[in-house]
């Protein structure tokens, strides 16, 4: 082999090796979209566990309930960790696509009702203003929680898709306002009652167990999910992430950090 051919052969080998290394690196790296608390915190906790298993995890943090799913669909991230099954179902129906799949359940964040003006549900006056999340799955969930605690009556107490049109009785003539979930802690002093997702309550330094007037119990069916696309849900890296999120280390982390405000679903 001539000197020139030998140099070309060596260069080709180097390029092939670099390409293989790049491919392997991409296969062992995950970018997951999450809301800050507790989702991103839990993902940050499992980073070292995954690193030992050969997977590099990047957490992309969002403060809304739309972009994580949109970016998963658009392949700008590999998956997301922030939603529950009713929200995923509503999102799929609204976006007219069905490419996201559940990888595993991780935890439950009990939905709670908070007030800066009243100490108990029985103190809520006639004509009071109540703020609830405006996304369909969580608004229905909030109405179910209000019905369970005697503030309203619904036509179907088991319907997760309940809307205000399904209110059969509103004896206190409550004025129910549907607002973006992330804004609810910020307007707490402007309303009589706000039904707030636990992740946003924790971010606002509210203690769900101590500060809520009433709250879902641990039997809530609204488990938060690790979600991926059909094309990557069965990848080795995603399976390793699912195993880490369902590990005993994560169970203990949730128990220690959130003190019952977040409950393992595995």
Image (tube, grey):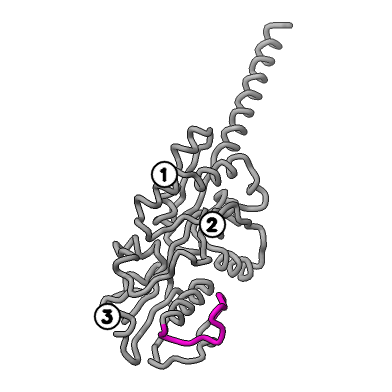
Instruction: Determine the residue located farthest toward the right in the rendered image.
Output: 1
Residue 45 is marked as 1
Disc 3 to disc 2, C-alpha distance: 33 Å
| Circle nearer the N terminus (1, 2) | 1
What's the residue at 53%, 87% (across, down)? 165
Residue 225 is marked as 2
Residue 156 is marked as none
Q: Is residue 211 above or below residue 240?
A: below
Q: Is residue 182 above or below residue 36?
A: below
Residue closest to the eye, 215 or 14: 215
Disc 3 to disc 1, C-alpha distance: 37 Å
Disc 1 to disc 2, C-alpha distance: 17 Å
Label 1 residue SS: helix
| Circle nearer the N terminus (3, 1) | 1
What's the residue at 66%, 24% (across, down)? 16
Left or right: residue 213 compared with residue 147: left
Q: Position of residue 126 (x, y in %)?
A: 34, 92
Q: Is residue 146 above or below residue 171?
A: above
Label 2 residue SS: strand
Left or right: residue 122 compared with residue 160: left
By secondary structure, the bulk of the magenta-drawn segment is best described as loop
Left or right: residue 36 compared with residue 29: left
Residue closest to the eye, 197 or 8: 197
Mark 3, residue position: 118
Q: Quadrant of the N terminus?
A: top right
Q: Is residue 156 above or below residue 206?
A: below
Label 3 residue SS: loop
Magenta-highlighted residues: 150-162
């Amino acid at each position: 082999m001539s000197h020139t051919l030998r140099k070309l052969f060596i260069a080709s080998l180097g390029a092939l090796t670099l390409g293989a290394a790049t491919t392997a690196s991409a296969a062992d790296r995950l970018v997951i979209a999450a809301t800050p608390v507790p989702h991103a915190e839990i993902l940050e906790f499992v980073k070292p566990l995954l690193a030992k298993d050969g997977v590099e995890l990047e957490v992309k943090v969002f403060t809304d309930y739309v972009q994580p799913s949109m970016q998963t669909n658009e392949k700008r991230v590999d998956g997301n960790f922030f939603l529950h099954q009713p929200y995923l179902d509503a999102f799929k129906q609204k976006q007219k696509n069905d490419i996201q799949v559940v990888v595993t359940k991780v935890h439950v964040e009990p939905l709670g009702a908070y007030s800066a003006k009243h100490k108990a549900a029985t103190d809520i006056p006639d004509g009071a203003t109540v703020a609830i999340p405006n996304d369909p799955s969580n608004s229905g969930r909030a109405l179910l929680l209000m019905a369970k605690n005697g503030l309203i009556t619904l036509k179907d107490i088991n319907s997760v898709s309940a809307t205000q049109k399904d209110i059969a009785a509103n004896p206190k003539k409550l004025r129910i306002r549907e607002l973006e979930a992330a804004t609810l802690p910020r307007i707490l002093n402007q309303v009589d009652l706000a039904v707030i997702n636990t992740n946003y309550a924790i971010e606002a330094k509210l203690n769900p167990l101590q500060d809520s007037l009433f709250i879902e119990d641990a039997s809530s069916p609204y488990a938060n999910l690790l979600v991926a696309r059909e094309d990557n849900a069965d990848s080795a890296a995603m399976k390793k992430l699912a195993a880490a999120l369902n590990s005993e280390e994560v169970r203990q982390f949730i128990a220690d950090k959130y003190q019952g405000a977040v409950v393992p679903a595995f």
